[in-house]
Amino acid sequence: MSLKGSNILITGASMGIGEAIAHAVAVEGANLILFARSEDKLQAITQTLKTKYPASKVIYHPVDLQNYEAVETAVDASVKELDHINVLINNAGLALGAPSPFPSLQIRDIVTMNATNINGLMFTTYAVLNASMKPRKAGTILNVTSITGLEVPPFPGEAVYHCNKAAQEAFSNALRNELSETNIRVLVLRPGVVATNFHQQRVGYDEALYVGFMEGYRPLEAQDVARSAIFMLQQPLDVSIKALDVVPSAQRSINVFDRTWNDRNA
């Protein structure tokens, strides 16, 4: 299915995977609605996208996804400007506190993760469905989850994030059933290890922990995940890639890494 002329809303669009997906869909001729907390970063990426892809319309809204009223206002404004939303990409998310085990986490970090990864995804989906997709009975929702949602990570500090991602998987499965008798597809994209600010943030920007985690193999880059998203979105309407795992080839499972990969493939 061509994305040309589609109106695509991306959350967490100001950096990392979200920014890479924004560029990838702009290449295909889509119009973009960008959500993130940082207005400065949104302004910068919007200007870049408008310059590189003049055929695409790009609008943005700085919004805290933890606040439903703010989400609803931003979605309604986007629909008013672009008429409808064809695709919602729920990409925003964060992990905090690793490698501290659950009892050592700060309560504020637990609340922030739950509010962003679960409420934020549900709030945006709810607003988009009611403002645009349900009335038209058409659209695609792509939830960027994680392989962490299916397997328990082997290291501490992941209890809340693992729970959040498992909840996203469950929500996606139930929502797909509830949207029967519409042309609204619900898809799930599960990245493995990606070299982005996200992984730096989850270990508190501890350089040694970050480098050690990536030792011996090439992690995914944001563009690898973006290509996978494009593949899923471009399938014909009667085809759904319900779920797709995209991982570094060296990540054999969530807890087994082939750290001799670089030596063999230099």
Image (cartoon, rainbow, N blue to C red):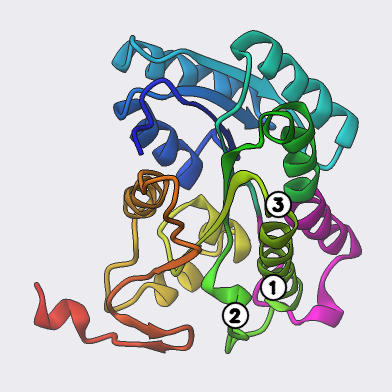
Residue 3 lies in the magenta-colored region: no
Q: Is residue 254 left or right of residue 61?
A: left
Query: Which mark, residue 150?
Result: 2
Please say if the residues under marks 1 and 2 sit with CB atoms less than 8 Å apart. Answer: yes
Q: Quadrant of the C terminus?
A: bottom left
Q: Is residue 105 above or below residue 64?
A: below
Type of amino acid under label 1 = Ala
Looking at marks 1 and 2 on the same chain, the residue that comes earlier in the sequence is marked by: 2
Q: Which residues are magenta?
A: 94-119
Q: Residue drawn 73% across and 56% down?
A: 117
Q: How many angstroms separate mark 2 from mark 3 (CA)?
A: 23 Å
Query: Residue 157 placed where, x, y %?
Result: 69, 77
Q: Is residue 46 left or right of residue 1?
A: right
Instruction: Count neighbours of disc 2 (C-alpha within 10 A) and say few if under 14, some if 14 to 19, many if 20 or more.
Output: some
* Image quadrant assignment for residue 137: top right
The residue that disc 3 covers is 179
Q: Is residue 189 visible?
A: yes
Type of amino acid under label 3 = Leu
Query: Residue 16 placed where, x, y %?
Result: 47, 45
Please say if the residues under marks 3 and 1 sit with CB atoms less than 8 Å apart. Answer: no
Looking at marks 3 and 1 on the same chain, the residue that comes earlier in the sequence is marked by: 1
